[in-house]
Amino acid sequence: MQGQNQQQAYDRGITIFSPDGRLYQVEYAREAVKRGTASIGVRTAGGVVLVVDKRIRSPLMERSSVEKIHKADDHVGIASAGHVADARQLIDFARRQAQVNQLRYGEPIGVETLTKAVTDHIQQYTQVGGARPFGVALIIAGIADGEPRLYETDPSGTPYEWKALAVGADRGDIRQYLEDNYEEEMDLAAGVGLALSALASVNEGGLAPEGVGVATVDVETEQFQELNETEKREHLEENDLLDEGDGNPGDDANPSDDADAGDEADGDESEE
Amino acid sequence: MQGQNQQQAYDRGITIFSPDGRLYQVEYAREAVKRGTASIGVRTAGGVVLVVDKRIRSPLMERSSVEKIHKADDHVGIASAGHVADARQLIDFARRQAQVNQLRYGEPIGVETLTKAVTDHIQQYTQVGGARPFGVALIIAGIADGEPRLYETDPSGTPYEWKALAVGADRGDIRQYLEDNYEEEMDLAAGVGLALSALASVNEGGLAPEGVGVATVDVETEQFQELNETEKREHLEENDLLDEGDGNPGDDANPSDDADAGDEADGDESEE
Amino acid sequence: MQGQNQQQAYDRGITIFSPDGRLYQVEYAREAVKRGTASIGVRTAGGVVLVVDKRIRSPLMERSSVEKIHKADDHVGIASAGHVADARQLIDFARRQAQVNQLRYGEPIGVETLTKAVTDHIQQYTQVGGARPFGVALIIAGIADGEPRLYETDPSGTPYEWKALAVGADRGDIRQYLEDNYEEEMDLAAGVGLALSALASVNEGGLAPEGVGVATVDVETEQFQELNETEKREHLEENDLLDEGDGNPGDDANPSDDADAGDEADGDESEE
Amino acid sequence: MQGQNQQQAYDRGITIFSPDGRLYQVEYAREAVKRGTASIGVRTAGGVVLVVDKRIRSPLMERSSVEKIHKADDHVGIASAGHVADARQLIDFARRQAQVNQLRYGEPIGVETLTKAVTDHIQQYTQVGGARPFGVALIIAGIADGEPRLYETDPSGTPYEWKALAVGADRGDIRQYLEDNYEEEMDLAAGVGLALSALASVNEGGLAPEGVGVATVDVETEQFQELNETEKREHLEENDLLDEGDGNPGDDANPSDDADAGDEADGDESEE
Amino acid sequence: MQGQNQQQAYDRGITIFSPDGRLYQVEYAREAVKRGTASIGVRTAGGVVLVVDKRIRSPLMERSSVEKIHKADDHVGIASAGHVADARQLIDFARRQAQVNQLRYGEPIGVETLTKAVTDHIQQYTQVGGARPFGVALIIAGIADGEPRLYETDPSGTPYEWKALAVGADRGDIRQYLEDNYEEEMDLAAGVGLALSALASVNEGGLAPEGVGVATVDVETEQFQELNETEKREHLEENDLLDEGDGNPGDDANPSDDADAGDEADGDESEE
Amino acid sequence: MQGQNQQQAYDRGITIFSPDGRLYQVEYAREAVKRGTASIGVRTAGGVVLVVDKRIRSPLMERSSVEKIHKADDHVGIASAGHVADARQLIDFARRQAQVNQLRYGEPIGVETLTKAVTDHIQQYTQVGGARPFGVALIIAGIADGEPRLYETDPSGTPYEWKALAVGADRGDIRQYLEDNYEEEMDLAAGVGLALSALASVNEGGLAPEGVGVATVDVETEQFQELNETEKREHLEENDLLDEGDGNPGDDANPSDDADAGDEADGDESEE
Amino acid sequence: MQGQNQQQAYDRGITIFSPDGRLYQVEYAREAVKRGTASIGVRTAGGVVLVVDKRIRSPLMERSSVEKIHKADDHVGIASAGHVADARQLIDFARRQAQVNQLRYGEPIGVETLTKAVTDHIQQYTQVGGARPFGVALIIAGIADGEPRLYETDPSGTPYEWKALAVGADRGDIRQYLEDNYEEEMDLAAGVGLALSALASVNEGGLAPEGVGVATVDVETEQFQELNETEKREHLEENDLLDEGDGNPGDDANPSDDADAGDEADGDESEE
């Protein structure tokens, strides 16, 4: 649509429109999201499911420090993909919003309300000068008024509600898998199975319990809960996805092991 | 009128005039509006009508999260086209203006007063440095002093009053259709029909109820009201526009399904 | 005087002088004024007259929303040409000045005092960084101390007093017409006739009542008054200027109808 | 001394020195002064004289709105050349300084004190970022301690005291005339004559009363006084300078009549 | 992936994304870390170990002023690699956080809490304009709830938890050594031995006691402790790593001795 | 050392270092000083002497308005060279410092203390962004503790103490003259003679009393005193330097008379 | 490592990293330090020694105004090399820190504490925008807890502790001399001798007493003391370094005498 030269002219400025009405900085922030490993959300009749890819760069790294699933409030969980440090800022913002809502109104914040507070915050960084957009996408999952809700926030600050979605690497392929296999009336366990299967569909050789993160918010208890290794293993076995390896799919995987890959891959470390 | 090179020189600066007196950033923001799916407003003797194109990228996305029609006050609705996150900022601004007016004067805000508060807000972003213009156009529709009123706000901050208008993709074709078919003395139902027909005129194969959003403000009740699926279906059948498909006109439609289209189309996600 | 390249170097900066002592951003703002449709002011012994070109882009647009004549105070009217959203800011500023003067001194603001408050405000935007100049020219017309007064404000913030003037498109030709036909001792009706004739002199085929705006401030009543359709028709007939068409002079007119003209003309929408 | 290219590199920045120690923005502001019509000051034993060129662009423009002579205080007048809107800012600043001095010390402000307050204000705009220099030169003339005083302020913020001076267009030629004809012991009338003759020396065909502005501050009365048309005519006749034309020297004059000259000359309108 | 020219376009801006979603300034800050001498952390069952390379540029420099190991609190130590002056800022920030936590909650700060406070602080410098990122990586080591914890902070502001890691020069090779030789159940002395051996693996000819810094936080005492020369010598002897030289590996070492190397090497002085 | 192109790259930024460690803006400000006419200071056993070149551009200009010698306090005088308007800012700053010192400590400010307050103020303008350096050098001369003191401030903000010095045009030649002829035990009259002779050494044809400014601070009285025309004439006669002309050395002098020289010389007007 | 062109791209920005992790502005500030004359510090058992090169540009300049040795507190001295005006800012900062410490804790500030307060201040100028780094290096010498301490601060804000060091011109050669001749157990007199010998090693023909500055802080008295001319002469004679000339080594010396050297050398005046 445009040549390489013209495009360059626009992406240097932080928050301005290009002649065809695009905000390149926001689009580049979306690329930052794609550089992160995948996160998946599934909404079922019985609650919401978050599944994340937790592959690590080195066996010496503690998997627990790969934070891609966060508890925002008792009834809301958030999964992220993209720039980790940016995600932390947004998670903190979301938690403060949830606390303030509880204090002010004496009741838990609505999932949609929370999502829109976050996206409004994100939008400010795309319009007002002196900062760059957030390079992260969030999946916000929770229960509101007894109903499971599943939202996405993207770097432009737009909120979307989904039945099932993926963000991060291989987003297109995973979403295709979800579209092909999603059923409205799944229970929560089936939702975990679907999400894990979708993630496995882009990883040869199966998934190891320690290579994934899984969390749910049950529509009954309305409590955010992360699954432990045993629970994850059961779900993987049940869905025939278990890989007994080390949870890192191999040398051809992305992100690469930078002890081998040397300098260039180092730039990827803060993307998940 | 100007060569490519000269134009580039001006569109990098945020808020300055070009030699022929144009504000390129504002014009590029208008392009952002055109990248969004269409929204239509029609004023009839019986009230005002808002119709929006609600096509979605994936069957898994909740249509209800494609927010293009918003209730600004009991008697005022707003439809948007363009950058979604920007629209949210303006809708919030409009709602606060409406509340403040109610508190201060004990009566509902006038539609023109509300429109001009919004356009003044937009204009500030085109003159004062440190921010970009809003990449969104709004249709503000409501009842004031018992009369239906229909306004447009554009990225320059100019208010226009219309009998019927379209913003967003295919704006020119839809407006032509409206000009050819508009009748002053239509009732509200005829207005809904005209707006849906106009939208269908640029969509081959008809419209599905879930693929459009319809809202009215009746001159009698002075209440903003969104139509449910059954009501929309009735209007579509009545006007012979019904498409029994999934509400997405097909693969050649814009915006495209990015699970298929890959990276490039992804940049369009936040446009409606 | 200067080559294309050198000029470009200076007009990118907001508020700096060029080597020959010019402020290009102010001059480009004057170009924005010329892109607007014409507004005319005439001072007569019986009062002041404002006439504006109200052509619209589409028959569906409400002419009343093409705001080019504004009441600033009971005894002062303002016509504008150029960037509409900018004009609104200045009109609001003028109204506040008029109100403050009434409150503080218990008497109506002088026309010259009002004009200079506006031009000082405009000048600030040409000297202090962080904003662009206003892309609009105003004609401020009113009665002060029983005398009709007629002022112009330009984008540099300079006030001028005139017997008769034009701003906007075709300014040079209309002014020539005014110079050739102006008579000091005209009454108010003759002034309306002169202004309409001057506008017609650059529009082939006459003027339609709905295609022009006319306002007067009578030296006796000291009241700003906009003429209704009937009154305008009488003046046009009296001066043999009546066009029974739709008030839009034709396809070759500027600004063009963008439903036909497509994308490019769209950039002109906020100019009058 | 420097080629065109190197110069360009420096004059884009607002307040930086060039390699040879020049502030180009200040020098370009001086060019803006030269683009204005001339103003002349003469100091005589009997008081100070201000004479300004009041040529106008159109016979329809009110000469009284060409403000080049201003009363700053009862005993001080100011003439300007250059950017009109900038001049107004400085005149206002001077008037406030005069009022404050009166309030604080119960006596009229000294002419030198006033001048230096103005030049300090001007200097700030040449050193601190975020604004451009003032594009105007002032002649400040008044009586202090019974003595006539005549000062110049230039765009760099430097105060100069003169016996007689010219600023604006043709400054060099007029100053030469003043140097050749100045006599210390002139009375006020002779000073008016000298100033008018100097202005006429660069205008073929004499001067019309309405084409010039004349003001004096008499050393006896210490009152600023503008001459009316009759008084100006008498001085012109007495000095054999009277032109019975319209006060505009002709088509070849600068600034040109933009009704004829078209777009380009329009940029000159705010210069005097 | 991208040519040299395109990359240049993006790395000049401080905090903006490149088209492929990278933040070049953050990546260049990582290069600054690699220019520093290595620091190593090892977590054992008995506590955490920090080992740093303390080579100096001149025998006259006091080794004690090469500060690469810092006590952040009684139970937490921090080692740094990269820009020394930047490290000091972060160490000070960490110490204040530890003190505030003690004051507010009456208990020592958690290692993870401390790490995340630091990384949030770092992230701010990568998103908000007006500053550059921190050019330093930290290893934060301590005991929390009786458990040894070992974290890394990188210039993007991402926290990672490790069993063993290296930052700074030769990071890839040292990490490989750690991965090959790490054992979960090592005691603290074995951890010191592993860290020293890993450092020696990239330094020919062994290590001198004064050329390294070693600190531990014992899981029993929960006290940060730096080893003295005798203790370091014992560990080096025990692991057969002792070099009896001056602690500077030789002329081919990096960083070079700038008394010999002249101007260019001087730029490296503030890197460790 | 560097080519023309590379130099340009650095002098556009206000306060940054070049690769060889220079601050070009400060060096260019020094050029601005050289463009001013010379000022000379001499310290003698009997007090300090200030002599300045007061040549003017036109016989109509009041020499008294060429302010190059200023009284900073009863016991301190200041001479300047360079940008006049900048000098005024620094003189005002110095006077306020002197007043504050008197108020706070009940005693006159020390000459060195005053000088360093001024140079610290100057330095701020060379390091902090948003302003340019001061384009002026000052000679600060006074009596402190019964001793004559003579200081220079340059555009970098460095204070120097001198026995005798020159700033401005011909600085090198005048200093050479001073070095060749300075005697420690001169009395004040001999100091005046030396300073005038030094100035005459670079002006063919002698000096006129009105063409120079002379001030002294006597070590006995500790009072700043400007010499009147008679006193100056006596000193010039005594030293055989008297020129009976107009005090302007001729057409070949610098700065040139811009009535003759036209536009280009005009840029020099604010330099002394 | 990088070509000339690429380097240029990075050194224009104030505080950003280059692709290989360098901060060019800081490195250029180091060049500014090298342009200054040398300063030397030596730590002995009996106290610390500061020796500075005090060559001046003209015999008329007061050597006492060449301030390169400063008393920061009773027990701490500071020598500087580089940009004089910058040094003054840092010295003032150091003095305030010392005073505040005395007031707050009732005891003298530690030398290390003082050094780090200064380096933290320096670091801020290398990370936060809107200012350039300080172009100066300091040697901070004093007694703390009865021990002599000798520190360096460089433009990056890094503190180093030394036994003996040199900053400024010929730094490499002087340091080599110090490394070859330093002995731990020297007394204070031997330390003065070593420092003077080291300075003489890069100056042909010896040193004159007035051409150097010498200060000590004795470990017994803990008092900063500058040596007078007689004392300096004795040390020079004792070490056979005495030059009976004027203290300026000759025309080939750097910095050159600008009365001869003309314009170019003038830029060096503020470097010592």
Image (cartoon, coloured by chain):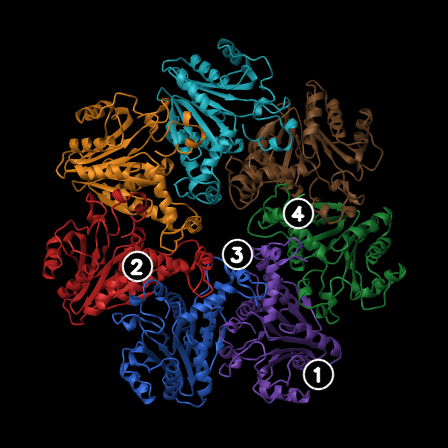
Chain colours: A orange, B red, C blue, D purple, E cyan, F green, G brown
Residue depth check, mark 3 versus mark 4: number of the one nearer the observer = 3
Asked if both marks, 1 and 4, belong to the same chain, the answer given is no
Q: Are marks 3 and 1 in contact (CB under 8 Å)?
A: no
Q: Quadrant of the C terminus of chain F?
A: bottom right
* Location of residue F254 in the rendering, given as x and y in whole percent from the top left corner: 75, 61
Disc 3 marks which amino acid?
Gly
Q: CA distance from mark 1 to mark 4?
A: 50 Å
Q: Are marks 1 and 2 in contact (CB under 8 Å)?
A: no
Disc 4 marks which amino acid?
Gly
Q: Which of the 4 image quadrants contains residue E61? A: top right
Q: Nearer the viewer, residue D264 or E198?
A: D264
Q: Nearer the viewer, residue C176 or G75?
A: C176
Label placed on residue F157: 4
Asked if both marks, 3 and 4, belong to the same chain, the answer given is no
Disc 1: which residue: D190
Residue depth check, mark 2 versus mark 3: number of the one nearer the observer = 2
10 Å crowding of disc 3: few (<14), some (14-19), many (20+): some
10 Å crowding of disc 4: few (<14), some (14-19), many (20+): many
* Location of residue C7 in the rendering, given as x and y in whole percent from the top left corner: 53, 62
Any part of residue E73 in sight: no
Disc 3: which residue: D130
Q: Which of the 4 image quadrants contains residue D113? A: bottom right
Task: Point out the tag, 3 or 1, that comes first from the N-terminus.
Answer: 3
Element carrying mark 4: loop
Residue depth check, mark 1 versus mark 2: number of the one nearer the observer = 2
Disc 1 marks which amino acid?
Ala
Q: CA distance from mark 3 to mark 1?
A: 46 Å
Asked if both marks, 2 and 4, belong to the same chain, the answer given is no
Element carrying mark 2: strand
Residue at 43% x, 65% y: name it: B1
